[in-house]
Image (cartoon, rainbow, N blue to C red):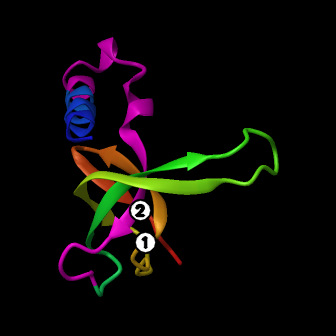
Amino acid sequence: MHNDLRMIRQRQADQIDFPEQSTACAASTTLLVQTVTITTYPTVAKSIYAVKTITATGPETEGGTVTLSGVTGDPFFATNLGSAIPPTGTPTVANLIGGQWVFIYNG
């Protein structure tokens, strides 16, 4: 997982340095994550949260049931740009923007 994050950061940096040469990079800068507690969970909505990647599995059919599982890898940090505090264990989508992982949780 640590190598995956390094690769994503490098691709993002390459896109910033050479935008005309990198068109498929944006798709690789989004991750499905879950908030986790390392030491003290934030008590303010617009804070930096520890997150880990998770996996969504299930049938790829309309109305199919999705199972979120596999909290894996080392934790990394993402900023909540939303207006509510996500409970620990909340799944969300994080995007790498300008070298910073961000997500929006509004409750």
Looking at the rendering, which quadrant does residue 49 occupy? Answer: bottom left
Q: List x then y, in percent, for residue 9.
A: 22, 35
Q: List x then y, in percent, for residue 32.
A: 45, 50
Question: Does the segment drawn in magenta span residue 39?
Answer: yes
Give left or right: position of 7 versus 95: left
Q: Which badge, 1 or 2, is on the more N-terminal residue?
A: 2
Question: As shown in the figure, which amino acid type bears the numbered disc 1?
Answer: Gly
Give left or right: position of 28 versus 75: right
| Magenta segment boundaries in residue numbering | 14-42
Residue, disc 1? 89
Residue, disc 2? 34
Residues at discs 1 and 2 in contact (Cβ within 8 Å): yes
**Which residue is depicted at the point 43% across and 71% down?**
89
Question: Does the segment drawn in magenta span residue 21?
Answer: yes
Residue found at the far front of this picture: 70
Where does the N terminus fall, quadrant-wise? top left
Residue 97 higher or lower than 79, as above or below: above
Residue nearest the viewer, comparing 46 with 34 = 34
Question: As shown in the figure, which amino acid type bears the numbered disc 2?
Answer: Gln
**Which residue is depicted at the point 44% across and 80% down?**
84
Helix, strand or loop status at disc 2: strand
Q: List x then y, in percent, for residue 2.
A: 20, 41
Looking at the rendering, which quadrant does residue 60 occupy? Answer: top right
